Image (cartoon, rainbow, N blue to C red):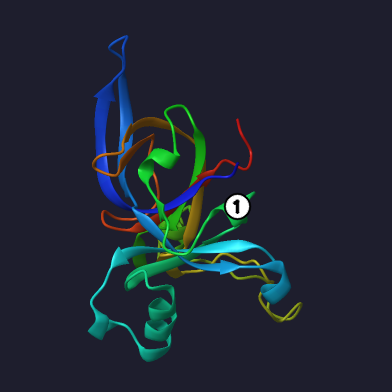
Amino acid sequence: MKKAIIGKKIGMTQIFDEAGKVIPVTVVEAGPCVVVQKKTTDRDGYEAVQVGYGDVKAQRVNKPAKGHFDKAGAGYKRTLKEFKFDDCAQYEIGSLIKADTFEIGDIVDVKGRSKGKGYAGTIKRNGNSRLKETHGTGPVARHAGSMGACSSPSRIYKGKVLPGHMGFENVTVQNLVVVKVDAENNLIALKGAIPGPKGGIVSIVNAVKKA
């Protein structure tokens, strides 16, 4: 059965296994998530479960979302995501999904939004080499350099790496191992790093391609 949960990145630390080996882990506050809506084949054309995470005050919710949450009677949530479980019928509106839905040893994919780096040049953004710093280059050793011929094709080809906005994009890290589950405190420890800053929202799902 497919498993999934929404969580908040707490930060990284390290734990020791039974053999005394150090394991770098990222701790995620996973849930509790509440089922807000069920999508059905008859009404929506597909089956899915909409899950909400993170309480929010009523005055911070707009009217359409307020009506949506009031209909479910599950409180106002900051984050909504849809998951296509193998058996969506077993979930009822208002039921909770907690951290103990995952077990130690599970292989998961973590989806989140990477840290924003702002405007970056081609060296930082794409790993380009710098120009030679001899006479004639001028004070532009870190610039993009030649963009191509002028007369033909008289344009820049698509795919040319250029300066621009770096980071703040959706990233998926695959095949991470669940090292520890603390159901009482809604915490999951995952081996390795996951995208986003501390406090960033992530979703944990079953691995699509198990290593």
Q: For the residue carrying disc 1, how many other residues have a C-alpha within 10 Å: few (<14), some (14-19), or many (20+)?
A: some
- Say which residue appears at 41% left-offset and 63% top-offset: 94
Which residue ends up furthest to the right in the rendered image?
Answer: 152
In the foreground, 127 or 168? 168
Element assignment for label 1 = loop
Horizontal placement of 211 versus 4: left or right? Answer: right
Which residue ends up furthest to the top in the rendered image?
Answer: 19
Q: Which residue is mark 1?
A: 85
Task: Tell me which amino acid carries mark 1.
Answer: Phe
- Say which residue appears at 25% left-offset and 45% top-offset: 11
In the foreground, 17 or 24? 17
Q: Position of residue 72 (x, y in %)?
A: 43, 73
Task: From this view, report whether residue 87 is shown above or below residue 168.
Answer: above
In the foreground, 191 or 189? 189
Q: Position of residue 159 (x, y in %)?
A: 65, 66
Task: From this view, report whether residue 120 is shown above or below residue 126.
Answer: below
Q: Position of residue 196 (x, y in %)?
A: 36, 55
- Say which residue appears at 37% left-offset and 90% top-offset: 63
